[in-house]
Amino acid sequence: MACLIKPLLLLPLSFWVYSTFLHDLWHTQNSSLTASIIGGCHGGYGGSSARGGWWELASENSGVSAMHMFIFPNTDKAIMFDGIVFGKSQIQLPPATRILGRKIKTNAYLWAHAVEFDIDSAAIRPLKILTDTWASAGGLSANGTFVLSGGWSDGRRTLRYLSGCSTCNWEEFTGALAGKRWYSTQQILPDGSFIVVGGRQMFNYEYVPNNGVSSRKNYQLPFLHETTDPEENNLYPFVFLSTDGNLFIFTNNRSILLNPTINKIIREFPILPGGSRNYPSSAMSALLPIKLHDPNPNVIKAEVLICGGAKHEAANLASKGIFVDALKDCGRIDITNPSATWQKSMMPSPRVMGDMLLLPTGDVLMINGAKKGIAGWGFADDPNTTPVLYKPENRKTQQFIELTATTIPRMSHSTSTVLPDGKILVAGSNPNYNYNFTNVKYPTELRVEKFYPPYLDPLLVSNRPFIILNFRGKTVNYGQNFVIEFKLKKLEVSLVHLKVTMYAPPFTTHGFSMGQRLLEMAIEKLINVGPEIFQVSVMAPPTATIAPPSYYLVFVVHSGVPSPGVWVQIR
């Protein structure tokens, strides 16, 4: 067992062996899941305030613990997976896909550790994956194939590819990466290739070509070594592609701007004080919406938001069974401004291990996590079950709004993602070894929920647009004007109340949503073409630096209420 415990949070062996399994009996409060009818429209639980959103139990059993999650374009499918190190899952591979005659260590060739989850029916299809994907990184490629890099054990130098067809399965290429990428971050670049940054004891980065050719070279980045500490709080770096083509990289409490063309650091930003922000201290971070209608066309502003995390001493205290409060502060910085400094604000409650999602409206949702401790098995307590809405355009005193709480703790290794209909899919938590459901305070969680943000309040349905044109199979070129036709129960629509957003859904794991990006489009014209039928002409993003080639969800937002999204490929 020690060989499995040692890497769990990357601290000294004694830390994990003597504390990981010192859990109390599970004593979480059993709350009634009595459904409440809201506006005669949806059933929910965990609170029935439409103004604060509401919750719905989507599935009792996802088959595998959703440590990693993403959605596929032009399908109704989400992909969820953990790692084969966690032993026997709750769903077997079909006999035809098993590999017999091989030594079985953890039933990896009998039990699935990845599933395709139908976001409408909750049906699951087991997927075969044989290399260990625990703590891997990923992103959607320009052609819609999902690319997954790294992981644990035999997965550390592995590249994997998954297409979205109904019978597709993972393709795996061991040894394709130059470095051993475990707890690294992947980001798509303007040319459609990926950069993979960091990982445990990997103070470098590498490029993965978009044609699947193996990576052959590591580029040293001493900054990653400088920001490590005894607890390795520089894992899963926050990496964002700025609007100027440079890469913002944040680890621990420091950040830089890296030019990926010449492979040089061109700027170092001020320290973000207060504590550590990356795994295992696990703050949340996102690139705030990029406004393509910005009045200054020479510099398209790009801002990064980082919220929560843990104090520097939190990991050491957790080893002694002392769980200190997580961080409550947020830092926000304009990464396109050479003289920018961090602007601080305070969340309503502390949070570690949370997720940060960009909503179609341009607001930010903070969800999942805990109020005390750090990431990992048994090193946090006091689940933070209350989502928070952050409104970037409001004054600091009015930016945070607490929403309706769930009844299910979503602690270590929980995930979430924005769905095309605007709901939030939430899954995972505490993937204990061998899927332990008893004798632990926070058991392995297989239930899947959907959270309905406040904009889905049935009382707001008259403000909800519905896009009529089907863009499936169509592409949009950079700088091109394209027309979106939508239906809205209004006689007139004003541009003051309308915006169009374009969203790149992320790969979410370990509290970070990789590749997430939201663009507020420049609107050229709005006309009424029939009873309650409107057409809005928008300008596509000007370059691949602003929007790397891939698939995006397009939303029409009226008076703060988004339409269901439609998929568009940009190239």
Image (cartoon, rainbow, N blue to C red):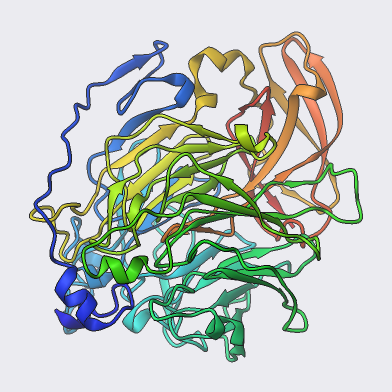
x, y percent for residue 48: 36, 20
For the point 17% across and 81% down, the residue is: 2
Q: Quadrant of the N terminus?
A: bottom left
Find residue 103 and report its image quarter.
bottom left
Question: How far across and how far down the image is residue 301, in percent?
Answer: 79, 53
| Residue nearer the viewer, 13 or 311 | 311
**Residue, x 66% and y 49% (percent of image)?**
288
Vertical comparison of 260 with 533: above or below:
below
Q: Is residue 331 above or below residue 233?
A: above
| Looking at the image, residue 571 lies above or below residue 540 | below
Residue 361 seen: yes
Nearer the observer, 442 or 544: 442
The answer to whether residue 146 is seen in the rendering is: no
Q: On screen, 182 above or below 94?
A: below
Q: Is residue 477 left or right of residue 15?
A: right
User: In the rendered image, which quarter contains the C terminus?
Assistant: bottom right
Q: Would residue 294 be found to the left or right of residue 124 on screen?
A: right
Indicate the position of residue 186 as horizontal and vertical percent values. 55, 69
Q: Viewed as shown, does residue 132 lie left or right of 339?
A: left
Q: How many marks?
A: 0
Q: Nearer the viewer, residue 57 or 429?
A: 429
Which of the 4 image quarters holds residue 400?
top right
